[in-house]
Amino acid sequence: MTATAANFLSIFFLFCVAVFLIFTFTSALLSWILSRILGASVEFCVGGCNSLRDVAVKFVKGATESVSIGEIKLSLLYSSVEPGVGFRSWNPKLQLSICNLEVVMRPTSTNKSSGKKKTQKSKTRSLGKGKWKTIVNIARYLSFSLTELVLKTPKGTVGIGKLNVDISKGGGPESNLIVSLHILPIVVHIGDPQVSCDQLSKFSVGGCSVSSQASAPPTEKSSAPFICEKFSVSCEFGHHREVGINIKNVDVSIGEVTVNLNERLLIKKKRSSESSSGSDRSNVDPMSTKESSTKQEKLARFSSLFPEKVCFNLPKLNVSFEHSEHGLSVENNITGIQFNSIKSRSNKAIGESTRFHFQLEFREIHLLREAGASVLEITKVNLICFVYVPVQSILLARAETEIKLGRFQCNIIMSRLRPWLRLHSSKKKKVVLREEASVVKPKLNESKTITWTCKFSTPEMTIVLYNMAGFRVYHGCLQSPHLFANNTSNMGTSAHIELGEFNLQLADENKEWLKESIFGVESDSGSIMQITKVSLDWGKKDMKSSEEDGSMSMLGLSVEVTSMGIYLTIKRLETLISTAISFQALMKSLSSKKKSTQSRGRSSKSSGKGTQILKCNLVQCSVYVLGETGLENTDVLDPKRVNYGSQGGRVIIDVSEDGTPRSAKVVSTVSDNYQKLKYCISLEVVQTKLCINKVKQSTQIELERARSIYQEYVEESRPMTKVALFDMKNTKFVKRLGGHKEKADCSLFSATDITIRWEPDVHLSLIELVLQLKLVVHNKKLEEYGNECRGDLSNVKGASCKNEATMESRNLEKKKGSIFAVDVEMLNISAELGDGADAMVQVQSIFSENASIGVLFEELMISFNQARILKSSRMQISRIPSISASASDAKGPVTTTWDWVIQGLDVQICLPFRLELRAIDDVLEDMLRALKLIVAAKTNLIFPVKKDNSKVKKPSSTKFGCIKFFLRKLTADIEEEPIQGWLDEHYQMLKKEASELVVRLNFLDEFISKAKQDPKSSDDLNNSSQEGKIYFNDVEVDVNDSSIIESMREDIYKRSFRSYYEACQKLVLSEGSGACRDGFQAGFKPSVSRSSLFSISVLDLDVSLTKIDGGDDGMIEFVRKLDPVCLECDIPFSRLYGANILLNAGSLTAQIRNYTFPLFSGNSGKCKGSLVMAQQATSFQPQVLQDVYVGRWRKVWLLRSASGTTPPMKTFLDLPLHFQRGEVSFGVGYEPVLADLSYAFTVVLRRANLSIRNPGPLILPPKKEKSLPWWDDMRNYIHGKVSLLFSETRWYILASSDPYEKLDKLQIVTSSLEIHQSDGRIFVSSRDFKIFLSSLESLANKRGSKIPAVVNSPFLEAPVLTTEVTMDWGCDSGEPLNHYLFALPIEGKAREIIFDPFRSTSLSIRWTLSFGSALPLSEKKHPSSIAINSTEADANVSHPPNICQNVSPVSPTIKLGAHDLAWIVRFSNLNYLPPHKLRMFSRWPRFGVPRIVRSGNLSLDKVMTEFMMRIDFTPICIKNMPLHDDDPAKGLTFMMTKLKLELYFSRGQENYTFECKRELLDLVFQSIDLHRPKCFLNKEECGTVSKSVNVIPKSTQSASEEKTPSEKGYLAQKNHDDGFLLSCDYFTIRKQSPKADPATLLAWQEAGRRTVEKTYVQSNCEKQSKTEEHMQSDPSDDDEYSVVIEDDGYNVVIADNCQRVFVYGLKLLWNIENRNAVCFWAGGLAKAAAPAKPSPSRQYAQRKLHESNNQQDGTETRQDDACETHQDDETEMPRDDGPETHKDEEVETHKDEGVETHQDEVGKSLPTGNILDSPSSLAARTTEFPSFPSSSFKMDSLPSAKYENTDDSMEGTRHFMVNVIEPQFNLHSEGANGRFLLAAVSGRVLAQSFHSVLHAGHDMIERARGTTEENISEYQPEIAWKRMEVSVMLEHVQAHVAPTDVDLGAGVQWLPKIVKGSPKVMRTGALLERVFMPCDMYFQYTRHKGGTPEVKVSFFSQ
């Protein structure tokens, strides 16, 4: 074996020598050939048989310029081989060594065109195993060594110290070839060559041999761009039968690698890459390449070629970068890089496959490391991957990857990243737009090559954020993140990420400080943000797009967060804001440099879609904001804006009266120890879902519940307050494209329950928090930007102004296409309006398809202090374009005018019981002002930066049009007191049951009594008597058994109670407003019908409110038109609110409680008018200090106007209201309710203290003057004109004190009614006026019967009624119409007295009632002409007209019976003095109502000083309506052409003041005028009540037949004198008192005459013509009384309180029939008018009072009688007795002298003269009376009596006087055949009284006292003596007898009238026989009163 080896070596040596010789020759030949053919010169030296030296090859052409080799040597080496364990052998190798190899490359030229690359198909031949073994056996003896390799290029140099290639054979049975490559070191330089062979040879040892430990020097290592100290590769090749040569094992080991980069290298690399990419892009055609096989086949082929085992080891990788220009230097380190790969076979269920096991590990990774800190630090990275490549190409490859990180920390150091970001932004200066290459869309059905799964996990990830100063700010820690991704599904790649707990903390936050400052948080509050668990899913999902497209897959991201907590404090917020502003400033500085380039280089289309669906689910989120607010005491300026109107305009008052600035003070309500108040605001969100779809452009947010709580802490341990700010449940928000062509943004907001609460403390805390954050933002911006932001303000403003137009146009386009829908099931909004005032708005449902158009509210309720104010079942608020605005074409900017429409189905406005609304309004106003002051104070303390208010407000593109209300039903009511409503309701129920119980018990008693007396007579429907047995309700009853009777009574009681109980159960209880939730009143719950005290209900209400043209100027002009004082005094106004009103209503009802009749009811209401509310401008008012509590911790001392110095809002109306039908009711039972109503408004409008912090009564400053009474308030507040027009009305005035009365009432019916009201005047005009009485119904009801409704005829019927009421007020100022009481601005100061000059001191009311006929103006006649035509057709005989009662007369008619008069008397008494203290109800103490001190004002009856009433009937007919047919007064009728009544009540003729003494309001003037009165009996055609009840018209024909005779009117006549009773030409009654004011009276009468003349101006002309024709045709009739009738000359009377009666032309027919009729009629009326008999209890009380008075006197019975007589005498004496009477008589005497002349003239005009009523004439006539004998009263009966005032010639006091002119009395007797006629020229009846005082017993007293000298004149006894006289005188009396048997048809004979101007003749008739000659008759009756027949004298002492 050894010999063989030696032989082989010898042979091999010889072979080498031969080879050397051949090599030498060949090299020479080769150099010559290369020189000749290639154009390269080759030079070398032979160093020996196995070496060449100094080889130099220089190429003329090509990329290589030259190659130089120091030495090439071929040598034989022996290497040790270890084939097995414990055995070693030496293996010889042939080694080729090359030293100092240097290759120089030429720079490549860019202008050469690159040729086409030809691809040759390489044919792979399978290598046999034998050949492989041969190659392995040969190659194991070869090796290669290269030392000092330098490759030089124009761009850089690569230097290698040593390179060894070793080939060996593996030791296994298989012939494996192992190739090893070792390189030491590798140095790469970019740019100029820096490495040469000489430099590398310095580190070589022994020529070409270099030590294995050699490395690059440190200087070169630090300067070279790339240095690799060691690179070793070991590869083992094997042979496979099918594949051929394959790689078994690969082992790569690299030493420490250092990469040094700078900006020059990156720039060069970028340029080269751009050029190469451009050339590649131009030359390579992507469509030219074709795949020869599928991807699966390639992967299978690659897997077969992949080594079975791969090992890679890199101990350290250093990458550094330097930027010399910016001075940047950074290092990156990666240590411990290991990669292992193992290939094996795997047999699984899916089939046979090749398995690759990859494992990659990193020990440490440091990126961007500088100064010992790295931006990214990873301690350990372990990547394990299993790849399964199937053998069959049909199956897919599969990869499973798992990545595990040890410690991960990211340090975001902004100071380090900032220069890199600037460097990055500076590189992107030029952006070149290129043509977009055609993007080949990937095919959807493209098959996958490999399926893979990936898992990523790390125990902890830390992120640290540093600020710009380099300090740590935030520290975030993420626990256990996991990532799982795969593409196993058909939808593509999907990923699932799970993140553990994440904590974000403030780096420099002290935990001990946190424990003290963080409060109210239960969880870990040391973290800013805390997230428990986060899950993310990313991948494609199936989505249903539409029915046509079907399902489609979209890439989506799903995020689920289990729990999130955010804990914020002031410090944390400041840090967040500072960091955010720093980042914003950095990004802004970077973005400003590339704005120009980016604006040019933006592409219009996005490159890819990305994630199309985003879903986020947050299970629970909590946000806590912890802060503190200051409670310090501060002063703040409080300027006040004042509007002086036209006398100064708008002024700001900022200085007080003392010259100091006007200010307010904010004071803390707690002690000074607590200067800070800590609070916590928490927000808890449960189950939040977010979904964003980019394809559909939709966004959806869902919240299961969101709740926010506000807590305040004075001490950290316990919260003082806890307020729930808001609470939302099941909230959903959706936004998507929709509408027309899906171009509009459609949004939907829905929620099931929303609760919101507002309080001032929360508001102030949030305001302070915002101010603090604004301060931080402001300071940080100044710090970051400095003066840049100030300098850029102008540029920013200019740019913003330029962009405003485009932005507005875009916004308008967006707004036009935006739709916002709302759907909320329940909304509760509550707020604290102030100290002691709360408000709540509750809506059960809110729905809107587009909120910009309208919103629908269901079950809307508004409450104040838990008391309901407004409630609506359904209300819709919407807006519509105005029709008027859209129709107009304007050239200016387009503006849209919108009309707001409010529609409601059932709206209820409630005034809760004793809710003080004015106090709530005051509290709200004070709280808002105080809140504004506190905010201003905090702003001055925290953020005193002035705002720039120079921005001009732009005009809005939309304008406000009008407001329209469409309400189906509107109800406004005042809540009843619960106990009052409950008691009233149950009282009515018990009253009904009690009455029924009494009836049943009475019936039982009657039944038992009848059964005991006669058992057979007790038969009834339910009670029968059979065979002596008695049955009651089908039960046998023994009437003698008392127990059975008692049980029956008890059963009746039980039934009654059971009925009451069932009635109670049927009641529907009222919910109430909530004002009485607690306390005693809460236990009483009335029913729905009794829940309201007063209610107003409107159906189908349509109201439109539009602006008044001209704005404020137009409203001022409107006020001046209505109020002349405003125009005259030029009154300025500070505030004006007004609108034009257009109203339509279906019906309007005002109801009091549940009374039978409504207070007012009207249907088909219409109104078109205007309303203005104006406040007078006044001078600056005096200011007072006020404490206003705001929240729980603060109060404000602020200045406000003194109480009573602010002018009120006044209302100016011009409203005509028209109703189709109206109903009005009233009764005395309403008066207590009106008192309750007044008290309700008193509570609402009064000032009160609602404060909870400072409870107690409201302390008001003492008033200088009293408040105005309600009538002065009306004069002060309400002005203008209001008209009420009705087409038909009904008025119900109850005749009972029971407001629930249905039957007993006075009813007024009119066809048309007009009521016009203005200041001081009311005018009423109506037609077909009728008054119905319920007297018959009352009688029938008392007797238990009913009468038909047809019977009820009107009591008063008038075709026309006109009423005018004029009120003249008097006050101290003398200007009652000037209601502007406060000082004007020009006065400069407030008035000391405001109300007193305006307070009414006198009131004069003039009331005129005129009843007229229904004739039109052309057909009307003057009353005198009507009288002439109707009553003077026959001068001798008058026939009564035939009038039927069933037909409506042409003239006013009164139908009166005794029962009617009794009913009227009772009705009058009830209304004048109602029982049960109804009228004084408000003065009596009530439950729960405090007694208020009375105002001290005069009552209205005291203020009224004059009352004038005029009642005029033209004409009138009065008919007697008896009850029975046999009534003698049946058919009694009174007719007058005119009836006028004038009453004048006055207190006297003095100037009244508030303090003056006021006399009683007495009747000072009375006037009654009857024109042509006539009385007759018409028994045939005039019915009675009984006839009307029994006879009912059966058809319209009978009614027409009855109407026919009545159409003749007054012209219908009866034969002869049947029915005539009385006739007269003129009848007057006059009475006047000295207290009457003659001027006022005369002016009133003249005004009345002007009214009559104006009314009958046309009929007067017709009357004159008619009168002339009548006088010519009938000269027997004269018009001697026309002067009296027309001129009314006897209106002037003497003011002596004497009632004077004048009768002209009296004709009286007295017979038995007339006597009976008059007596029965007068008796019935007297009985009806008689006062009711007192009740027994009242009689007993009067008797006891009389007895007690007698006992107290202690005198004898006679003395008592004398005293009573004396008292009676004094009672009968008039009130004017005494000195005042004598004064009045003297005044009357002087007045009578002037009156006589006028009366003489009137008397001369009469043919027979007249008896004057002057005192002188009366005195003259008195002497003509016969003297009566004095024995009627002898003075001698009183011995020694002295008289005073006993002169008979002295005038007495006149009481009444009757003057009759030409009376005729015709007496008729049925028994005698004749009539007796008594006539006179004139007659007089005078009644007067005389008063005297007698001194009685003077002589007897002197005798009894003797001769004493004492003066006894002072002790003289006196007796009051009174004489009454009635005198009757007839002048020229003549008597005649007319026999009736001479001419049976002659009728009644009367004396004819003597025509004026005719000679004096004796008046007589044709059939009259004179009885006696004319004479004068006198009659006098005297009654003495004051003494007795036996006068006892007694001495009187002092």
Image (cartoon, helix red, strand yellow):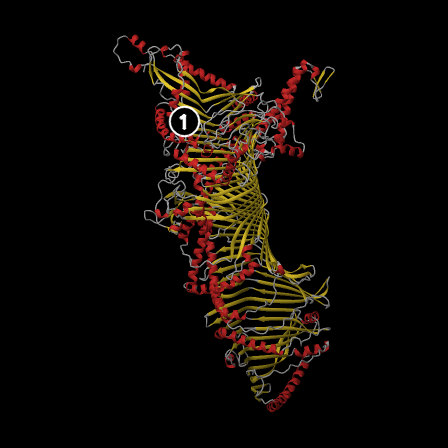
In this rendering, position of residue 352 left or right of residue 201: right
In percent of the image, x 26 and y 8: which residue is there?
1907
Residue 222, visible in the rendered structure: yes
Q: Which residue is mark 1?
A: 1812
Measured as percent of width and height from the top left, residue 1679 is found at 48, 33
Q: Could you tell me the amino acid type at mark 1? A: Leu
Q: Is the residue 222 above or below the residue 1203 in the image?
A: below
Mark 1 neighbour class, 10 Å CA radius: few under 14, some 14 to 19, many 20 or more: some
Q: Quadrant of residue 18?
A: bottom right
Q: In this orientation, which residue lies closer to the viewer: 607 or 1867?
A: 1867
Image coordinates for residue 1759, horizontal then vertical, percent: 40, 12
Instruction: Check the image and name the residue furthest to the left.
Output: 1909
**Between 114 and 1898, the one nearer to me in the picture:** 1898
Q: Quadrant of the N terminus?
A: bottom right
* Relative to 1046, residue 1384 above or below: below
- The residue located at (36%, 12%) in the rendering is 1835
Quadrant where the C terminus sits is top left
Closer to the camera, 1251 or 1804? 1804
